[in-house]
Amino acid sequence: MGLGLLLSGRGFLNFPTGAAKWLVLLIEVAATLAIATTLAAAYTGGRRDPPA
């Protein structure tokens, strides 16, 4: 998102005033879901049964 703003002529992570709160919240929710998914996958898929 920051790169898109930079390429559009604004500064890096320089959000429009009215939408800044919601854009930051959106980024934080996306990061939280990505981290939670990664941790859940690492926890549930990390162990195998030993060969008999």
Image (tube, rainbow, N blue to C red):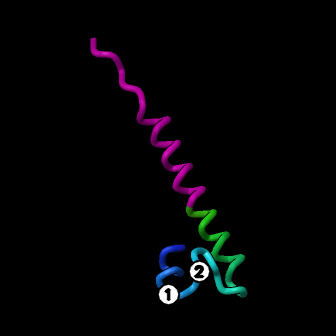
The residue that disc 2 covers is 11
Give SS at disc 2.
Answer: loop
- For the point 56% across and 63% down, the residue is 30
Residue 38's place in the image compared with 20, above or below, is above
Give percent across and percent down for residue 14: 63, 79
Q: Residue at x 66, y 86 (%)?
A: 16
Q: Is residue 22 magenta-colored? A: no
Residue at the spot x=60%, y=56% of the render? 32
Secondary structure category for the residue under label 1:
loop
Residue type at mark 2 is Gly
Location of residue 20 by image quarter: bottom right
Name the residue tied to disc 1.
8
Residue at 62% x, 63% y is 29
Residue 38: x percent and y percent?
Answer: 49, 46
Residue 9 percent across, percent down from the top left: 53, 88
Which stretch appears magenta? 31-52
